[in-house]
Image: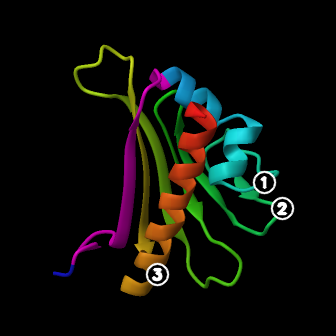
Amino acid sequence: MPTGLTRDAGWQIGVSKTLPLPPEAVWDFLTCDEGLALWLGPGARLPRDKGAAYETPDGVRGELRSLRPADRVRLTWRPPGWAHDTTLQVAVSPAPGTAGARTVLRFHQEHLADAAERERQRAHWRSVMDAVTDALTG
């Protein structure tokens, strides 16, 4: 099976990075207006209720699948022009062996259409990770 292709979730991509901040600080940033603008889109509002729909000012739309504060959010994610939904998960966790002083941040997207879309999304989430890292660590 090619890299990034799974039986259950189809094509998927994951991007992660360890940040020199506690998980609560990273989560608070990701869910504030500035942080949401970086990963969900400028002007985006994160729904709080499971099944609630959202649409960003730039046309990304979907619905909240789950929200575990200070841990992870799962939502469907469909930008303008796409004919299918994907599932996006954003997760924070304490980095092993750091007593909560460092955080592993993960962006994981599944149900991508094909290998080419996977590569485009890999570039997208790497760029998002760089923007989040720059905003948090300056």
Q: How is the image coloured?
A: rainbow
Whether 134 is drawn above or below 64: the answer is above
Of circles 2 and 1, the one toward us is 1
The quarter in which the N terminus is drawn is bottom left
Q: Secondary structure at mark 3?
A: helix
Q: CA distance from mark 3 to mark 2?
A: 23 Å
Residue 80 position by quadrant: bottom right
* Residue 57, numbered circle: 2
Residue 21, position as x, y percentages in the image: 47, 23
* Image-based side of 132 in relation to 101, left or right: right
Where are the magenta residues, as a range?
3-23
Query: Which circle's residue, 3 or 1, is located before the other in the chain?
Result: 1
Relative to the observer, which residue lies in front, 1 or 15? 15
Residue 73, position as x, y percentages in the image: 52, 43
Query: Which circle's residue, 3 or 2, is located before the other in the chain?
Result: 2
**Callouts 2 and 1 close, C-beta under 8 Å:** yes
Residue most extreme to the left: 1
Whether 81 is drawn above or below 53: the answer is below
Amino acid type at circle 3 is Glu
Residue 119 position by quadrant: bottom left
Amino acid type at circle 1 is Pro
Query: Which circle's residue, 2 or 1, is located before the other in the chain?
Result: 1
Is-magenta flag for residue 104? no
Q: Which residue is mark 1?
A: 42
Relative to the observer, which residue lies in front, 40 or 74? 40
Q: Which residue is mark 3?
A: 117
Residue most extreme to the front: 138
**Callouts 3 and 1 close, C-beta under 8 Å:** no
Residue 87, position as x, y percentages in the image: 49, 62
Residue most extreme to the top: 99
The residue positioned 66% from the left and 54% from the top of the image is: 40
